[in-house]
Image: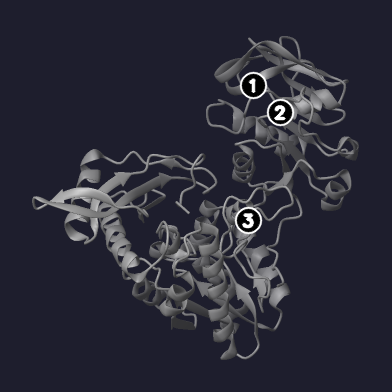
Amino acid sequence: MADGTASAPEQVVLVVDFGAQYAQLIARRVRELNVYSEIVSHTITAQEIAERKPSALILSGGPASVRVEGAPQLDPAIYDLGIPTFGICYGAQLLAQQLGGEVSRYDQGEYGRTTLRRTDGVESVLLHDGIDAEHTVWMSHFDAITEPPTGATAVASTANAPVAAFEDVVRRIYGVQHHPEVVHSEFGQAVLEQFLWREAAIEPTWTMGSIIDSSIEAIRAQVGDGRAICGLSGGVDSAVAAALVHRAIGDRLTCVYVDTGLMRLNESDQVVETFEKHQGIELIHVDAAARFFEPLAGVTEPEAKRKIIGETFIRVFEEAKAGLGDAAFLVQGTLYSDVVESGTGDTTATIKSHHNVGGLPDDVDFELVEPLRNLFKDEVRRVGSELGLPDEIVWRQPFPGPGLGVRIIGSVTPEKVAILQHADAVVRDEINKAGLEREIFQSFAVLADIRTVGVMGDERTYAHPIIIRAVNSDDVMTADWSRLPYDLLETMSNRIINEVDGVNRVAYDITSKPPGTIEWE
């Protein structure tokens, strides 16, 4: 299997991850300043950094203490590369520890909103005059920097952080104890802007237009005169990927929509109609439901289901390829969040295999083209709008590649799919009627692998529960459960129980991500 690599700008900021819950948020905040960023492991070496030639480094926070044995470290040779470096929380403490400063167990930690005070009489580069001398920041630490790195100057403090910020303008090394990436830090984005645009001298040129232009250029370079096929899933990701590739290679792209039998109610008809109407791309519709149900029979382990679905997808595509002659490339809507969650790096934990990343078989007879591989979900929507795709495609709610197969807990059968399709249709219909479709990132139903006792018509029932899931998210990496109105939840519950055979109970999932994932499997 050959992997297609999405193009990246020449100027890149590497966010070094030390296990922080906010590492992805840092990367997103950088991108919001029109600067391209990627997340890398703290195990990266100075040689690897030098080869990538980043314009700046940002060291993330992390849950560990720099003072304990075995705490994550950074190759000290990296500091000799002369790359502008900005440490946040743990990252700042590590800079202090490795560069001659001191990190101590202070009187008490600081968590949440804290007042930061710029040091009187000391000029600050990052906390410049446009930022209030006293302002609110978001803290999350117990250890504190008590001496800045050798050659650096302490430029701010808080009640329990004597060196809340330090700067070494000669070595271009900066650190703050707080989290500028979170919205609770009053001037956080201004601090990032100062570091990136001015101190690192990065041009804010990473825009939707530049993304499209560079992606088209990369696609043409990769595909050349060849032909490609694109697997449409019904979601925005594959649709935008197809639009980008079509813009690059024209009628040498053929799209294949596979009805897995695991789609939402009436999804297949809607996808085919919408896509043919708006895209003008050759589309092959394959009804392969039986092909998917057979290998899934009796399979209950989530990762096994994902891999079965991923491999079956590929086999169907390979058969479609037989009628397309020299189609050697497979276009997929892989996102950056898919790559991170699938644990494709040496030190990245696998949260779940995405069918188009970790779920692919080893013997794929295609070279992958993944033009969205470096983008988060909201960035994909913006690219779709820039390409002129209609709202019904751009704002279609996310739908996992494995479809309802990962929303049915336990074994997947046609009967369970039918139950879930109808329950899910009620959830989506009521969300739409309430005018919340654009406000809620994702809403759907889950069929649990249990049965519950109920009473219907004065008789005992023993049927399935349905779990409603609704979340708000910008990038899929984190999500918060949606506070749906009680009357809306009541309406959905009544309709599901009254209209869907085999269901006698409805629950609402109020778990955020983390600790849960958006999907149940």
Q: Decide: few, some or many residues near mark 1? Use Cα within 10 Å; few <14, some 14-19, many ≥20.
A: many
Q: Residue at x 83, y 27 (%)?
A: 169
Q: Which residue is mark 1?
A: 141
Q: Quadrant of residue 22?
A: top right
Marks 1/2: CA–CA distance: 8 Å
Q: Residue at x 59, y 64 (%)?
A: 359
The correct choice, above or below, for 443 with respect to 118 in the image is below
Q: Residue at x 60, y 36 (%)?
A: 21
Q: Decide: few, some or many residues near mark 3? Use Cα within 10 Å; few <14, some 14-19, many ≥20.
A: many
Q: Which residue is mark 3?
A: 339
Q: Is residue 154 left or right of residue 507?
A: right
Q: Are marks 1 and 3 in contact (CB under 8 Å)?
A: no
Q: Percent from the top left, x then y, of residue 256? A: 50, 79
Q: Percent from the top left, x then y, of residue 95? A: 80, 27
- Residue at far left of view: 458
The one nearer the camera, 423 or 124, is 423
Q: Decide: few, some or many residues near mark 2? Use Cα within 10 Å; few <14, some 14-19, many ≥20.
A: many
Q: Which residue is mark 2?
A: 90
Q: Percent from the top left, x then y, of residue 511? A: 42, 40
Q: Amino acid at mark 3?
A: Val
The one nearer the camera, 508 or 152, is 508
Q: Secondary structure at mark 3?
A: helix
Marks 1/3: CA–CA distance: 29 Å
Q: Are marks 1 and 2 in contact (CB under 8 Å)?
A: yes
N-terminal of the pair, mark 3 or mark 2, is 2
Q: Amino acid at mark 1?
A: His
Q: Amino acid at mark 2?
A: Tyr
- Specify whether residue 248 is in view: no
Marks 3/2: CA–CA distance: 25 Å
Q: Percent from the top left, x then y, of residue 165? A: 72, 21
The one nearer the camera, 327 or 405, is 405
N-terminal of the pair, mark 1 or mark 2, is 2
